[in-house]
Image: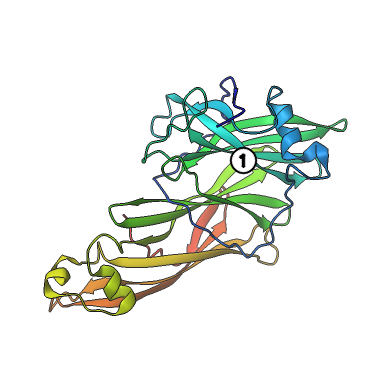
Amino acid sequence: MKSLLLASACVPIGVALSACERPATAAAPVAAPVAVLPASSAVADGSIAALMREAFPKWSGQGAVVLHVPSYDHPDERIAIAATPTMAVKIDATHRALVLVGTPSDEAGHDAASHAQGGNLGIRVFELQGGRWVQKTAQDSVMWSGSMGILGDVELVQLGPGHPALSIVSGFTGQGFNVRNLDVVELEPAGARVVLPGIRLSADALGAYAGCDEWLNRHQVPSTEMLGDLNPGNCFEVGGAWHVQQAAGAERGDIVISFDGHRVVVDEHTQAKSVQAVAGTLVYRYGKAGYEKAGGENPVPEV
């Protein structure tokens, strides 16, 4: 990794730790994205490069910066991360957010992430003062998520007019299981806030035991020997697609997740095993502290 600047430790303003390890996958929110100002934007004073130079005057103009943040699994300890500038987001006419995505590193910024460690999301908010963007808030560790140092797929969504947010879809893969989770972080003039933490979005166990993938997806009934190993806890595939559904009169829309898939079930009387379809809809509505469940259940198995 080139062009790394060693930055002094910044005290994060609000640290939200995700619950678990989680692999990246794409989520396609239907809501219109908020404005993004890339490094090549003609609006030079609000670009990624301009905000980076304001926050890190010695930044070379490319590459990551080394920051020290609370550890992934020991918040009382601090570790080094290589934080890469990823987006410059318009919050409103006088506020911009710089999005930093980090991975555990050594002091020189070289990747040092283990399989169990996730990636880090950092946010710095700037305010327009006298024609210049001035840094107002530094949250170098808003949350951790993912695995192998990879935070996940970060997308821009609009929760409602004037309420830009980031969705982070991330996860973990291991021992034949794949898990994906959704976090939503709202961007405000005062800083970033996790408004929907760690919702199970999808999971499958297609690689856990022989015969599962063939049975669920190819309708090939496993041999008696294979069938004996399969059960509801190790043979399933359930996925969720999510979007923001705007509601008249509400500042922020509902987050709606639609699930479908299938899994092995066991008849409680005969002990016969079969494949059962899985479907459902889960709705989260904005409340006092963030999004709260308003209806439905999550059919994605816990792993």
Q: Residue at x 81, y 44 (%)?
A: 93
Q: Residue at x 15, y 78 (%)?
A: 272
Kindly indicate the quadrant of the structure image that contains residue 300: bottom left
In-front residue for pair 138/190? 138
Residue 126 in sight: no
In-front residue for pair 125/228? 228
Question: Is 68 placed left or right of 37 in the picture?
Answer: left
- Type of amino acid at the residue the image marks with label 1: Ala
Kindly indicate the quadrant of the structure image that contains residue 134: top right
Question: Is 294 placed left or right of 48 in the picture?
Answer: left
Q: Which residue is mark 1?
A: 192
Question: Is 289 placed left or right of 261 in the picture?
Answer: right
Here the colouring is rainbow
**For mark 1, does the 10 Å Cα neighbourhood hold few (<14), some (14 to 19), or many (20 or more) residues?**
many
In-front residue for pair 248/224? 224
Q: Position of residue 12 (x, y in %)?
A: 56, 29
Q: Residue at x 35, y 67 (%)?
A: 237
Question: Is 183 placed left or right of 228 in the picture?
Answer: right
Is 81 rendered above or below residue 94?
A: above
Q: Residue at x 27, y 66 (%)?
A: 235
In-front residue for pair 210/292? 210
Image quarter where the N terminus lies is: top right
Q: Position of residue 177 (x, y in %)?
A: 32, 56
